[in-house]
């Protein structure tokens, strides 16, 4: 028997960034479907990249942390709020969606 | 550049369909994802929300004319209509009454009521129907486009048939109870939901075209849906007593067409009695060939 209680798991990460995103219209990619996720990028004040995750797959915090840390190394964004709604996407899918969202930012 | 390459409507997400269906760059969304108007119910059940609750609504231009549009995302909860999702559709329709666009387009893809939200979802669907009929009565055509992989079922199936005009692709499906629901309630002998050919023969776009339940049959191609939507901009058909009686007569005739016991496939037997020659060929024919088979 699992001792993980039912319900969503909420995870928050924050990284200091040095690539200022500036002003941009919010970007949404992906869909909250089985094995998939949606990623919303919004401008934020400050020099942090804040990442908020809500996921139906509980107990994978360590893997999420590794995935978003890798993401921030690829894209050290500053002044960005990343919000994720996840329905059990694999780490590879999560990384691709995050990169897809950033690619929509590029001028 | 790539304009001539066909893009599958079924394989697009709701937002991709919207972007390609209306005039380029003209979609202005109301309650966009950044507003986070999400379901108040799903998180309590341990189910993730979507920032738009599975439907995008707004205004756009279509061939240079102002329209209101809604697009349901079938991959999120099967396009199920929850409280917020339904309220967004109702708000769009009520705003159409006020602002009088040339048409309202509904890119429907839904299994019907989102069961997680129970009565709130049921009430939402009934409010959508009421609002849609108000818009139709005001002479603003409501055009429903059906071509998503999840079809258009349950309450949204009824909503579609309340509209002025229904556009379907052969990939699209339209019905009240979905295949799994029929199998669960009446048994696999009555309906085998895993028999995809049977499912499409009885709910698919070709069947709906031949039986007169949709107004246009198009290829699974976003450009074809766009052309059909443009052609439907003046398709207003307000509900009148005459129109209702005509609809009842059509349904009564269809009910009498089939005997109680059919030898062989029921859908093909119905097509035959509707006057379709060599009905057994229909599943293998392409859209253009099926389009000319409709007899009335």
Image: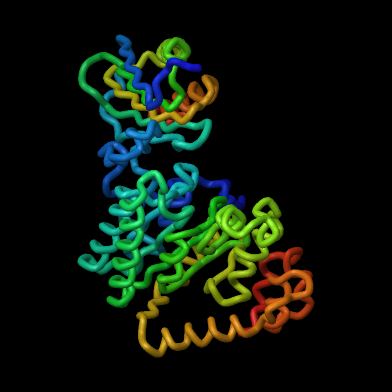
**In front here: B261 or B3?**
B261
Res B52 quadrant in image: top left
**In front here: B232 or B147?**
B147
Residue B57 is at least partly visible in this image: no
In this rendering, would A79 be left or right of B167?
Answer: left
Q: Residue at x 69, y 71 (%)?
A: B267
Q: Position of residue B250 (x, y in %)?
A: 54, 84
Q: Position of residue B137 (x, y in %)?
A: 30, 77
**In front here: B272 or B26?**
B272
Res B51 quadrant in image: top left
In this rendering, would B172 be left or right of B79?
Answer: right
Q: Residue at x 47, y 51 (%)?
A: B17
Q: Residue at x 30, y 9 (%)?
A: A16
Q: Residue at x 51, y 27 (%)?
A: A89
Q: Say above or below: A71 vs B215.
A: above
Residue B216 is at least partly visible in this image: yes
């Amino acid at each position: 028997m699992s001792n993980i209680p039912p319900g969503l798991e909420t995870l928050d990460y924050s990284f200091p960034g040095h690539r200022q995103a500036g002003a941009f219209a919010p970007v949404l990619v992906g869909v909250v479907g089985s094995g998939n996720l949606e990623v919303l990028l919004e401008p934020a004040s400050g020099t942090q990249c804040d990442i908020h995750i809500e996921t139906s797959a509980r107990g994978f915090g360590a893997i999420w942390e590794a995935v978003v840390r890798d993401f921030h190394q690829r894209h050290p964004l500053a002044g960005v709020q990343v919000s994720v709604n996840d329905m059990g996407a694999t780490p590879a899918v999560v990384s691709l969606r995050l990169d897809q969202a950033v690619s929509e930012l590029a001028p | 550049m790539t304009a001539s390459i066909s893009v599958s409507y079924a394989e697009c997400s709701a937002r991709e369909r919207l972007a390609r269906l209306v005039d380029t760059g003209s979609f202005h969304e109301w309650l966009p994802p950044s507003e986070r108007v999400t379901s108040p119910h799903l998180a309590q059940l341990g189910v993730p929300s979507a920032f738009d609750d599975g439907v995008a609504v707004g205004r756009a231009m279509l061939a240079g004319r102002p329209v209101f549009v809604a697009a349901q995302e079938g991959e999120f909860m099967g396009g199920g209509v929850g409280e917020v999702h339904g309220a967004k559709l109702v708000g769009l329709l009520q705003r159409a009454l006020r602002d009088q666009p040339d048409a309202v387009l509904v890119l429907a893809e839904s299994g019907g009521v989102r069961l997680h939200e129970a009565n709130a979802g049921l009430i939402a669907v009934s409010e959508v129907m009421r609002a849609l009929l108000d818009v139709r009565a005001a002479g603003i055509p409501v055009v429903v486009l059906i071509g998503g992989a999840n079809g258009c079922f349950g309450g949204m199936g009824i909503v579609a048939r309340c509209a002025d005009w229904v556009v379907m692709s052969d990939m699209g499906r339209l019905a009240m109870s979905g295949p799994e629901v029929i199998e669960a309630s009446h048994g696999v002998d009555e309906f085998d939901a895993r028999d995809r050919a049977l499912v499409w023969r009885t709910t698919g776009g070709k069947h709906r075209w031949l039986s007169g339940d949709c107004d246009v049959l198009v290829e699974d191609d976003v450009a074809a849906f766009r052309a059909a939507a443009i052609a439907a901009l003046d398709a207003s058909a307000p509900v009148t007593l005459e129109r209702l009686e005509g609809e009842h007569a059509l349904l009564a005739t269809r009910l009498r067409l089939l005997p109680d016991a059919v030898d062989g496939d029921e859908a093909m037997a119905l097509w035959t009695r509707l006057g379709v020659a060599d009905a057994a060929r229909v599943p293998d024919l392409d859209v253009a060939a099926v389009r000319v088979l409709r007899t009335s």
